[in-house]
Image: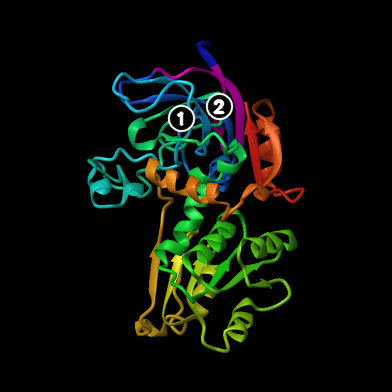
Amino acid sequence: MARTMKAAVFVEPGKIELREKKVPEVGPNDALLRITTTTICGTDVHILKGEYPVEKGLTIGHEPVGVIERLGSGVKGYREGQRAIAGAITPSGWSNACLCGKCSQDGAGTKHGWRPMGGWRFGNTIDGCQAEYVLVPDAMANLAPVPDHLTDEQVLMCPDIMSTGFSGAESGEVKIGDTVAVFAQGPIGLCATAGARLMGATTIIAVDRVPERLAIARKLGATHVVDFSKANPVEEIMRITDGRGCDVSIEALGLQATFEACLRVLRPGGTLSSLGVYSTDLKIPYDAFAAGLGDHRIVTTLCPGGKERMRRLMEVISSGRVDLRAMVTHRFTLDRIEEAYDLFSHQRDGVMKVALTP
């Protein structure tokens, strides 16, 4: 086995480039995954632009699909050569956060104080998976075998996009017969639309302005689509619901405007489920919030991780109830990583998700 590998490394704001790095050494509880397919996430673009700080020299990426190359001495129940994925969030399984049922916040409480997103380690606090190999920590809590009948691209969305999008509907506690509005139909919003349908919503209103994304939203379960470049989405949603409003609104973009619109379309007692990553302070309008007397709920969710979550998501794919392969619009080899970032970060050529293969 080679001692070095190619990896996409954060150099400085505005620059991620391919470099040679040492292949990680495997500790007792780790696994070394040889990457066969991965992708670029919107969060990676925030890192590229310097909007989210990471250490210089860090390998980027948090959506791995691959083959187990080596297992630590303490890792049981797996075999080398087995196909597997790991979630973008890699909980230890034994932390206070995990034992409180919030695995995504694993590691959030430290001697330096509280910090959010403690469970997000790949491409954040440890080397990620836009490389030929990635070291999976706490492998027995995080490695999920891929069924033989599923392809890499079928399970590529499970580690992050699918888990995050579905969680928008789950945290919003969507019920049978609910009306749900999903603002923004990027990859996460599309998965939220699919999740709302699986949870039992019968009226699902997808909001975006890109015709191709609205078309995919319909295939994934949207009963209505609203092009916000042609109509005021709040007014249109209230018209569709006969003035009643939505039981749940899901914010999947991370902007003040969409957050506020989500609040304005809620019925009294409705839930705003927020998936967006916000770069500025949010303001809650007095009238939309009914002065705090509207029995509204606002909930946030970080991508659920761990092997059981991954297993469940792959079961959904296996069942045929959701097919997300249409989201992969472009394919690159790892050698062309800088070209892939340029395309994805500038959202050219109708790009949604990029499949990267070493």
Total numbered labels placed on residues in the image: 2
Q: Are marks 1 and 2 in contact (CB under 8 Å)?
A: yes
In the rendered image, residue 255, in percent from the top left (x then y), is placed at 54, 63
Please identify the quarter of the rendering in which residue 11 is found.
Answer: top right
**Viewer-proximal residue, 48 or 124?**
124
Q: Nearer the viewer, mark 1 or mark 2?
A: 2
Q: Which residue is mark 2?
A: 131
- Say whether residue 23 is magenta: yes
- Say whether residue 224 is magenta: no
Q: Quadrant of the C terminus?
A: top right
Q: Is residue 6 above or below residue 285?
A: above
Which residue is painted at 55% across and 27% down in the image?
131
**Viewer-proximal residue, 321 or 349?**
321
Which residue is painted at 30% across and 46% down in the image?
108
> Principal SS element in the magenta part?
strand
* Helix, strand or loop under label 1: loop
In the rendered image, residue 146, in percent from the top left (x then y), is placed at 50, 36
**Viewer-proximal residue, 4 or 221?**
221
| Image: magenta residue range | 5-25
Q: Which residue is mark 1?
A: 127
Which class describes the residues within 10 Å of circle 2: few (<14), some (14-19), or many (20+)? many
Which class describes the residues within 10 Å of circle 1: few (<14), some (14-19), or many (20+)? many
In the rendered image, residue 304, in percent from the top left (x then y), is placed at 40, 50
The answer to whether residue 296 shows anywhere in this view is yes
Indicate the amino acid at tag 1: Asp
In the rendered image, residue 121, in percent from the top left (x then y), is placed at 40, 38
